[in-house]
Image: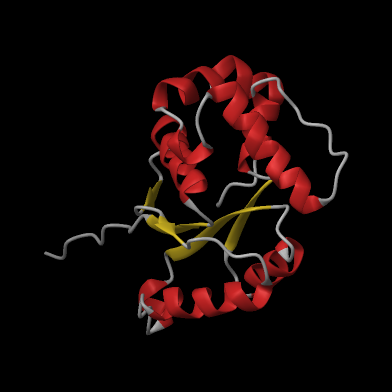
Amino acid sequence: MKRPLKKLKDVIVPFCEGEAEKNLFGFLKLRFSNKKITFTTPKDICGFEKLDQFKRKYNKLCKGYHLKPKKDFSNVKFLFIIDNDLEDSKKINEFLEKEGHYVQLCDPNTEGMILAISGHPQVKSVGDKEYRKKCKIAFRGIFNCEAHKIKEEKLEKIFTNEVVLKNKLPEKVPR
């Protein structure tokens, strides 16, 4: 008698721009996972600003997974979580989508997104690099730490079901 084949779950390998995104992803994964998709531990890409810097890191990371032959790994997908205020965010997003990967842009950046969700939106009144610094300073002032060091208790207060439903977080989630 033949055994029925067990359907493999989809596996998502997340890559985060830095520690703040990795921390946030880990928290959200635990709270809002639907159990239909398996996520591996997020990998920290360790920052980048431009497309050429990103492509170097991308090639090194993706080659390290040896996903050949493609048919054997059809249920494995890559998810890239990056800030939307990088110099080449748009180009990086286009490149990743063309490669067939999932992309989640933190708009405008991780600190700015968390500030907005918690009711402290920042007015964008300066250039991109200064605005990025402004968000980081405001985040430190309000939460008394840098984004990559924010504690789970504070994230729980920010991402209560009431806040999430009220602000309607973007639903660009892998399917």
Q: Quadrant of the N terminus?
A: bottom left
Q: Which residue is situated farthest in the left direction here?
A: 1
The answer to whether residue 67 is left or right of residue 160 is left
Q: Which residue is situated farthest in the right direction here?
A: 125
Residue 170 can be seen, yes or no: no
Q: Is 64 above or below relative to 77?
A: below
**Front in this rendered view, residue 23 or 103:** 23
Residue 3 can be seen, yes or no: yes
> How many callouts does the rendering have?
0
**Front in this rendered view, residue 2 or 12:** 12
Identify the residue shown where x is 58% and y is 30%.
Answer: 140
Identify the residue shown where x is 58% and y is 47%.
Answer: 173
Q: Is 146 above or below relative to 144?
A: below
The answer to whether residue 6 is left or right of residue 64 is left
Quadrant of the rendered structure where residue 8 is? bottom left
**Residue 126 percent coordinates (x, y):** 86, 44
Identify the residue shown where x is 70% and y is 28%.
Answer: 116
**Residue 117 percent coordinates (x, y):** 66, 26
Q: Is 19 above or below relative to 137?
A: below
